Amino acid sequence: MLINKKSPHGGDIYTNRVRLDFSANLNPAGTPPTVVDALQKAAETCAAYPDPYCTALRDGIASVERVPAQTILCGNGAAELIYAFAYALPKEKPALIVSPTFCEYETALTAAGIKADHYVLKQSDDFRVTEELLQTDMTRYGAVFLCSPNNPTGITVKGDIIRRLAETGTHVLLDLTFLDLTETPDKYAIPRLISAYPNLTVLRAFTKSYAMAGVRLGYVLCGNEAFLQRM
């Protein structure tokens, strides 16, 4: 929305103001009071440098996700981790993006110097990921980007398709940042997936679930410690 204002010194001032932003996709319940309290208490320690390894946070996430702490990498929001994932990929192969989906995947691949191909979902399938995806020759790609529930369709992917995709051995970024906002937040057996498929990287974030986008806090889960170190 473009707002026209009059300057006290004459002339016009144009400002952009968005009153209702439906693109943010945050928890409509708002930021929990416990998060606000934690942020206020944390301000008391802002003079000290933070732990670069996020030890306490990773231990807490590990307890909730039921995975080893060494499989967790925290980042400055999910967006930073998408870029870190892209930069860790082999450069000689393109990556496949299951589309339509979040545009940041392709932006990150472009920044990393990796060509992006698109597997376009069909409107006749209501933009659902079907087993037809598995007919793609995944050996051509250095990675596959898959979002569940997808942004912008809001449709989740069947667990069996994710498992069979991971079985191809290709790096898979499984973006689950919106999963907590669905009726099936426990849809996937994440600990089992992480331990069985080291080529699978699961992306999660506090941003959407707890409506705290301004804090910038996300994390990935991956059983391949060497790959996590490259990130």
Image: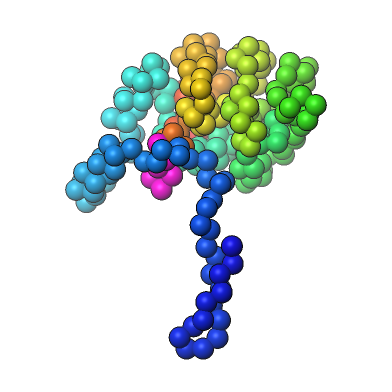
Question: Main SS type for the magenta part?
Answer: loop
The extreme left residue here reads: 44
Percent x, y of residue 206: 42, 35
Q: Is residue 68 left or right of residue 94?
A: left
- As displayed, is residue 228 above or below residue 197? below
* Residue in the picture at 19% in, 48% down: 44
The one of 81 and 218 positioned closer to us in this rendering: 218
Percent x, y of residue 56: 28, 30
* Residue in the picture at 73% in, 19% down: 130
The one of 209 and 192 positioned closer to us in this rendering: 209
* Residue in the picture at 43% in, 44% down: 213
Percent x, y of residue 147: 60, 29
Percent x, y of residue 3: 56, 69
* Residue in the picture at 61% in, 35% down: 151
Q: Is residue 169 left or right of residue 183?
A: right
User: Split into 4 quadrants, where in the image is the N terminus?
Assistant: bottom right
Magenta span covers which residues? 210-217
Quadrant of the rendered structure where residue 144 is?
top right
Looking at the rendered structure, the number of numbered marks drawn on it comes to 0
- As displayed, is residue 12 above or below residue 107? below
Report if residue 206 is visible in the image: yes
40 drawn magenta: no
Q: How is the image coloured?
A: rainbow
The one of 102 and 156 positioned closer to us in this rendering: 156
Report if residue 194 is visible in the image: no
Q: Is residue 65 left or right of residue 224?
A: left
Q: Is residue 207 left or right of residue 14?
A: left
The one of 23 and 146 positioned closer to us in this rendering: 23
